[in-house]
Image (tube, rainbow, N blue to C red):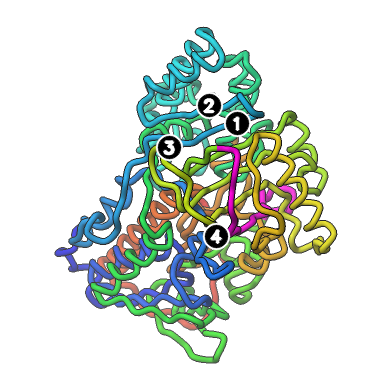
Amino acid sequence: MGAGNKAWGADARVAIIGAGIGGLAAAALLAARGCAVTVIEKAHHPGGKARQLPVDGAAIDAGPTVFTLRDVFEDIFRECGAELTDHVTIHRADVLARHAWEPGQQLDLFADPARSEAAIGDFAGAQAAAGFRAFRAEAARIHGILDTPMLRGSKLAWPPSLMWRIGLWRVGDLLAIRPYESLWKVLGQHFADPRLRQLFARYSTYCGSSPFATPATLMLIAHVEAQGVWLLEGGMSALAAALMRLAQRHGARFRFGTSAAMVETRGGRISGLALADGERIEADAVIANADPAALAAGRFGPLGAMAVSGYAPRKRSLSAMVWLAHTRTSGFPLQRHNVLFSPDYPREFADIHGGAPPSDPSVYVCAQDRGEGSGPAPQGRERIQIIVNAPANGDSHAYTEQEKDQCTQAMTRSLARCGLELEPDFPHTLLTPNAFETFLPSTGGAIYGRASHGWAASFLRQGTRTGIPGLYCAGGSTHPGAGVPMAALSGRLASQAVLHDLASMRRSHPVAMAGGMSTRSATAAATD
């Protein structure tokens, strides 16, 4: 779709609930096609999870920090008649991430795979380097099989549909994605060193899932990251602001500090939105850039609850304990992205499965003032985001101050085990699953939607279309999955579905129907 071709969208009215990355991508693409786009956002800023919060006078990224699949955003900007690099400043990261287990056990992965292989060989021996080569080749093959038909294509209802899309003659490819084996098991076939198995198992947490329950298919995430990690000046919120400006350039309107209360229908299809203040917005299509769990729970009215299927709390992805800190650091030589591992990975996920944050956690540290290379640390305090995985129980358990203190102590012990020290009583804000439940209602604080557990997880994730004609879903909790580029792809899929369906309606010359509401099966209709 190109910015100059506006034939089908010229007079279509589209309302978008939520200015997260998926909603922003959809807004820009639809506005560029001539749709009259209105974005409703309850917060006072764009970005959704890609937001900054103030701590000790510093604005700290409170959401996603790892930027991959740059081409997804380059394509969106070009389709809207612009260039990504004219709107954000981007640098390629030489070091993908720094990993540590204890002092003297430190391993960097690099943008150059040959350097990563050499580093792994130095760290764990020639057999480990050979295992990495085999792992990298398998991850690349899985990604190559699934990238176009599944990650960038519309949702598939069941494995036969995937087989049809990748080619009926490619039976070997269906087996090669290894959907019936756990990630943890298959990593054991590549890496005898438990530290390397733990390192590459961590990629399952990128979609909020346990490596012991996710299919080995998720090895493809390692290939995505190996294709390039990029550093954005201003953080991910700068990307959100750029997408908003791109949409506004084509006429999209943004209403901040305003909540959508109810989706409305007429003649069996969507007709608009009612806002919390009583105002009504007429729309030919509505895109809900919100977790489908909020729709299913009736957060946008009874019709919205009929449009999608909910899922049990045990199916939720991980939540997190997130410290936004402004602190002096010492000891460990931080890169931008750092992972400091626990000595017992199975125990971490057993703790979470039991309903508690890990007592001895692995810790992700994003040092937001660190650039490339191993130059001197920032003078004085620096901006740090620290993440520990946690259960998505923010709607059923209220974390006490004592529990928060215990989590902070466990986190700082894990840092100290690897040699990283924070200043005493460092200024910080701690976000718990309770905070994420407030931000992402009806999820328990699950940051990534539905967990990717079991071979069928990808087929059960909410698709673009819903049980109400004209109502669509986008965001990191819908197909194709969690993460900033995946959310953007969901916005693209939503924009394509809107334009396709509006064009089909015009070609069929529909006759107006009597008033009423959609009662199609949400289960049957929420599959694409």
Left/right of residue 512 with respect to residue 315 in the rendered view: left
Labels 4 & 1 near each other (Cβ < 8 A): no
Along the line of sight, the residue nearer the viewer: 405 or 12 = 405
Which mark identifies residue 107?
2
Q: Is 226 a magenta residue?
A: no
Q: Earlier in the sequence, mark 2 or mark 1?
A: 1
Residue at mark 3 to residue at mark 2: CA–CA distance? 14 Å
Residue 521: percent from the left, percent from the top? 59, 60
- The x and y percentages for residue 12 are 30, 75
Q: What residue type is labelled 3?
A: Ser
Residue that carries the numbered disc 4 in the rendered image: 62
Residue at 60 percent of width and 55 percent of height: 447
Which numbered tag is attached to residue 152? none
Q: What residue type is labelled 4?
A: Ala
Q: Looking at the image, is 420 positioned above or below residue 430?
A: above
The residue under label 3 is 374
Amino acid type, callout 2: Leu
What range of the chain is rendered magenta?
A: 311-332
Towards the viewer: 519 or 364: 364
Q: Residue at left 56%, top 28%? A: 200
Name of the residue lying farthest toward the bottom = 278
Answer with mark 4 or mark 2, whichever residue precedes in sequence: 4
Mark 1 = which residue? 100
Q: Are marks 2 and 1 in contact (CB under 8 Å)?
A: yes
Place of residue 138 in the rendered image (x, y in percent of width and height, measured from the top left): 45, 20
The image shows residue 408, relative to residue 396, as above or below, that is: above
Q: Is mark 1 on a helix, strand or loop?
A: strand
**Residue at the spot 61% in from the left edge and 65% down from the top edge:** 440
213 horizontally vs 114: left or right: right
Mark closer to the observer (1, 3)? 3
Mark nearest the camera among 3 and 4 is: 3
